[in-house]
Amino acid sequence: MKARAPLPPYRPWGPFLTLFQREILRFLRVSVQTVVTPIITASLYLFVFGATLGERLSVVEDFSYAQFVIPGLILMGVINNSFANTSSSLFMSRYLGQIVDLLVTPISPAQFIFAFTFAAMVRGLAIGLVVWLISLFFAPLPGTFPWLAFGMAALASFLFAQVGLIAAIYSNTFDALSMYSNFLLLPLIYLGGVFYPISILPPFWENLSRLNPLFYLIDGFRHALLGQGDTSLAVSFGVSGALSLALFAWAAALIATGYRLRS
């Protein structure tokens, strides 16, 4: 009787790498929708605020309006695409019933989250990089603290990848999922200081804006690129990091218990 070939050794991170690869290939397969369209949308924003208003307005000393608004547009691309990647992928897996097969594989909740999250970060940061390259045609950015800027962009991408996972778990319909984007994500972005510094607002509205978690991401990223912001980099990283950990723990708890995933 012919001897059976020995099985390959089990790799603890094998399921993570497989799922991560699947998520990368998933959004690349529809790259026109997931990559090209966001870049075109961001380019239109850059044209409006860079070519038409950029040199005619100024809201911060020593910088044109284009230089002020470009960091916010870059981070907006990072945030929107990170959220969209995890939320659409996990929701479709639930909708098509594929998530049940995935949950019986030997993959831990942390590996599950990191696979979805890292794929979303690849997409989000890639869009942010392309938007930054396009923005060079409209206004140069000094890049005062480039590594801190990258760290803040990565933190924003990680944070909203968790928001996308949570939204996908709690949503039962496509309309419910779109509500998170239209009635939570977009208002937080637009009111978080993308197009204006909160320091020009009346005291009441300025203090209210500081309750918006998006403010710390946007202001921290802009501060790292321009060298000035409405709050310190330490506070921006501290608030954003704490919120990221809290959302990661929330997503991990939902996935570990299989909440709304097994039915």
Image (cartoon, grey):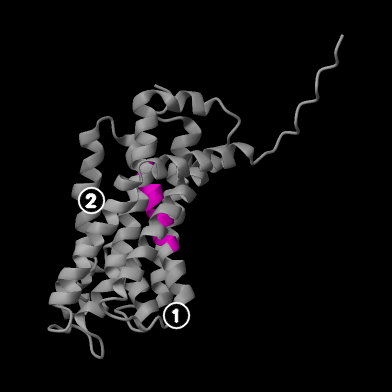
**Residue type, label 1:** Phe
Task: Please tell me which residue lies in front, 206 or 101.
Answer: 101
Q: Residue at x 57, y 28 (%)?
A: 105
* Rendered-image quadrant of the N terminus: top right
The answer to whether 109 appears left or right of 66 in the picture is right
Residue 216 seen in the figure: no
Work out whether 219 lies above or below 169.
Answer: below
Say if the magenta span includes residue 215.
no
**Residue 145, which numbered label?**
1
Picture coordinates of residue 33 (x, y %)? 29, 45
**Residue 70, which numbered label?**
none
Picture coordinates of residue 182 (x, y %)? 19, 48
Work out whether 60 lies above or below 152.
Answer: below
Pointer 2 residue: 184
Work out whether 56 lies above or below 41.
Answer: below
Q: Which residues are magenta?
A: 154-165
**Residue 3, located in which quarter of the rendered image?**
top right
Question: Which secondary structure, mark 2?
Answer: helix
Q: Residue at x 34, y 51 (%)?
A: 35
**Residue 187, located in which quarter of the rendered image?**
bottom left
The answer to whether 167 appears left or right of 5 in the picture is left
**Residue type, label 2:** Leu
Closer to the camera: disc 1 or disc 2? 1
* Rendered-image quadrant of the C terminus: top left
Q: Residue at x 85, y 13 (%)?
A: 2
